[in-house]
Amino acid sequence: MALIADYLDRMIVNTILVAVDGSPASVRAARAAVGFAHEHVSKVIVLAFSDCAEGEPAKAKGQTEEVRDSTYLIGEYALKARIPCEMHVLHSKSPTEDIVAEATRRHCDLIWLSAPGAANEAGHYLDTAITSEVLSKASVPVMLFRSRGAET
């Protein structure tokens, strides 16, 4: 574990792309990314994903509100940490491609995701399959943050 911490401390990270889906686990991961960005004087770009097409009724309403609320909360964390933060809400059917493309387009040094596992809530959009695809397709390091609790 110390080797990973030493490696991360030596990394030059100017821009971190954080992908969230509105779940509490992804918000906790984003909060950790903001803390990491603060320590490394980095900028954070948040991509908040919804699997609903814009304008879809009932399903979209609840999910869109959840994503909107989580991006607001992440923005508050960034503001308190005094780090630059961009927020983008995407209605996407292919988040893997969007995450990888945005990381490349915006010259990100690190992609930060919530690690799939027991603490992650079932049924949220950024699941194990998407995480695995990002790991295999990304040209930059990917940090998987394991959530440990219910606090956000």
Image (tube, rainbow, N blue to C red):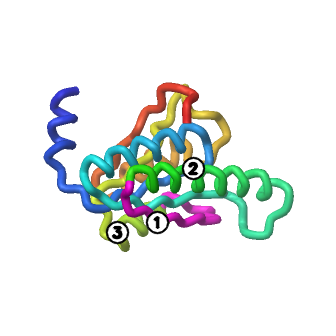
> Which tag is nearer the camera, tag 1 or tag 3?
1
Compared across the picture, whether 21 is left or right of 12 comes to right
Which sits in the foreground, 58 or 33? 33
In this figure, which residue is indicated by the disc labeled 2?
73
Looking at the rendering, in which quadrant would you find the N terminus?
top left
Disc ID at residue 104: 3
| Residue 56 image offset from top left, x and y in percent | 80, 65
Image vertical order of residue 118 relative to residue 12, above or below: above
Q: Which residue is mark 1?
A: 86
Quadrant position of residue 105: bottom left
Distance (Cα) linking label 1 and label 3: 16 Å
Callout 2: 10 Å neighbours few (<14), some, many (20+)? some
Q: Identify the residue at image location x=58%, y=55%.
A: 71
Q: Regarding mark 1 in the picture, which secondary structure is present there? A: strand
Going from N to C along the chain, the mark reached first, 1 or 2, is: 2
Residue 47 appears at what percent x and percent y?
A: 51, 60
Instruction: Please name the amino acid that badge 3 sits on.
Output: Thr
The residue drawn where x is 42% and y is 68% is: 102
Badge 1 amino acid? Glu
The percent position of residue 32, horizontal first and vertical second, equals 41, 41
Circles 2 and 3 in contact, beta carbons < 8 Å: no
Q: Whole-Å distance between the Cαs marked 2 and 3?
A: 26 Å
Quarter of the image with the C terminus is top right
Report crowding for label 3: few under 14, some 14 to 19, many 20 or more residues within 10 A (C-alpha). Answer: some
Q: Foreground residue, 53 or 21?
A: 21
Question: Magenta part of the protein: which range?
Answer: 82-96
Residue kind at label 2, given as amino acid type = Leu
Q: Would you say residue 148 sits in the magenta stretch? A: no
Q: Residue at x 59, y 64 (%)?
A: 89
